[in-house]
Image (cartoon, rainbow, N blue to C red):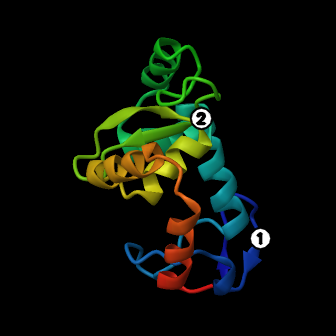
Amino acid sequence: MKRCPQCRLTKPLDEFPRNRSTRDGYAVYCKPCHNARGRSIRDRLWGGTRFYHLKHRYGMARSDFDSLMHQQRGLCAICGVEPASHVDHDHGTGKVRGLLCFNCNGGLGQFKDDPMRLALAISYLQRLPMEPSQTTFFREAVGP
């Protein structure tokens, strides 16, 4: 059993998060109080969970995000039509490239950010429509 200084209740140890850095191996505050304190700190310091994650994942302050959003006029950096809501970054360097809509961000992810795969996809889409004889050959080659 352990006492939480926030709610002042004595609770079983499984009601406390694990923490290897403390002497007893458990956090000071019970899970509900621990979560409420974390939420309060994120709201106070970063204006919410979203900006907390942007800072820790990409090193972006809220002002950086707002500036990028303003530069892109709130629209996706690729299609320029949909609202930008996702931060796009280079997975190798971690550097932020821009803000994208859900579909464009997902598309880059599906192509694994590989310019060659994207070039091949563009080439594929720009081909002339296939003749009926070519589609028959294609169906025979890959099956029904």
Residue nearer the viewer, 138 or 52: 138
Which residue in the structure is indicated by mark 2? Answer: 85
The answer to whether 32 is drawn above or below residue 83 in the figure is below
Q: Which x, y percent locates residue 14?
A: 66, 85
* Residue 91, disc: none
58 is higher (above) or lower (below) than 8? above
Q: Earlier in the sequence, mark 2 or mark 1?
A: 1
Q: Nearer the viewer, residue 84 or 135?
A: 135
Q: Amino acid at mark 2?
A: Ser
Q: Quadrant of residue 34?
A: bottom right
Q: Is residue 69 left or right of residue 56?
A: right
Q: Which residue is mark 1?
A: 9
Please give the name of the residue rendered at 56% of the width and 86% of the height, measured from the top-left corner: 143
Quarter of the figure with residue 98 = top left
Total numbered labels placed on residues in the image: 2
The structure residue drawn at horizontal position 42% and vertical position 38%, both measured from the top left corner, is: 55
Which quadrant, please, contains the C terminus? bottom right
Give left or right: position of 4 versus 98: right
